[in-house]
Image (tube, grey):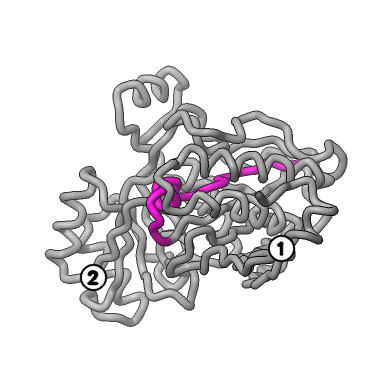
Amino acid sequence: MQAPTKNLALDLVRVTEAAALASSRWLGRGDKNSGDKAAVDAMRKSFSALDIDGRIIIGEGEKDKAPQLFNGEKVGTGTGPAVDVAVDPVEGTRLLAYGRPNAISVVGVAPAGAMFNPGPSFYMRKLVVPAAAAHVADLDAPTDENLEKIAKALGKDVDDLTVFVLDKPRHSRLIEEIREVGSRIQLHTDGDITGSLMVIDPRNPVDVMMGVGGTPEGVLSAIAIRIMGGAMLAKLEPQGSDEKTALINAGIDTRHVLSAQDLVKSDDLFFAATGISGGSFLPGVRYTGTGAVTFSVSMRGLTGTVRYMEASHQFDRLMRVSNVKYD
């Protein structure tokens, strides 16, 4: 692996800010692809100004034929450190399209060769917990046993736990099991990166994230988890015969439990996210008439520094020097 030598954390915030500003115009307009394309285009242009030799390892959009920064695409000027790049220009395209909370724009960067390449895998089963419960989490344990041990590790009663679960038909039994043990549930239609971030953010009341979500989102989440602390356990879990066949043909073992350290094999990591629609993790883009205000988080792995930032953008000045237009 070739280690980055520059602190890219703040540069990446500019990338996610550009994507959030471009896509937020589509809030609630019912057109998820147009909002996603606006974010993709803005993100690609912003990357073109960064002095990195980047390659997209995680490019969200392939599984649902949405606009995307495609896997293998080169980003950056080609000078500077060689890095693996994971992107989700709009995490929660349906959230954006229907004006729902917690759509965000996300980027993660690792040294070249450090990032897990999911290949044909689109879905994985995940368990995310705070650092204090990392030693008791067990992806293969029964739900009640897991939640009881996690609650004890966190110094809580099991009925005080709040569990993030995607509100999908595949989780009907899981939701029943959580209710049976007595824990509280936050059901979200989309956005399992946001769910992972909520768990490891000490300012947020969510204690656990459980269930099947996207593999690309799992790798992106692992970057933030390694920086902020906490633990993720995951297994590739195909949701259709085509995905299962593709994994078998690729010789990928779906029985292996992956940790955040397996998904990203370095501490020299960078992560950035900017709120688009607003919600319980990051506020969304707020327009002022002459510009906009954005809210972001920036993380650097080597130092463990996490910054929460509010930025004011003046469009008339910004568009004189930026290659990204905010129409």
* First reached walking from the N terminus: tag 1 or tag 2: 2
Q: Residue at x 77, y 60 (%)?
A: 316
Q: Quadrant of residue 124?
A: top left
Q: Quadrant of residue 313?
A: bottom right
Residue neighbourhood size for the residue with mark 1, other residues' Cα within 10 Å, grouped as few (<14), some (14–19), many (≥20): few
Q: Residue at x 26, y 54 (%)?
A: 141
Q: Is residue 198 above or below residue 319?
A: below
Residue for badge 2: 184
Q: Is residue 150 above or below residue 261?
A: below
Q: For the magenta stretch, what is the residue range?
A: 83-101
Q: Is residue 145 above or below residue 63?
A: below
Residue 12 in the image, given as x and y percentages of width and height: 70, 55
Query: Which residue is the extreme one toward the front?
Result: 289
Magenta-span inclusion, residue 120 = no
Residue for badge 1: 302
Amino acid tagged 2: Arg
Amino acid tagged 1: Leu
Label 2: state its secondary structure.
strand
Foreground of the two, 258 or 17: 17
Instruction: Give me the C-alpha separation between circle 1 and circle 2.
Output: 35 Å
Residue neighbourhood size for the residue with mark 2, other residues' Cα within 10 Å, grouped as few (<14), some (14–19), many (≥20): some
Residue 311 in the image, given as x and y percentages of width and height: 68, 69
The answer to whether residue 325 is left or right of residue 283 is right
Label 1: state its secondary structure.
loop
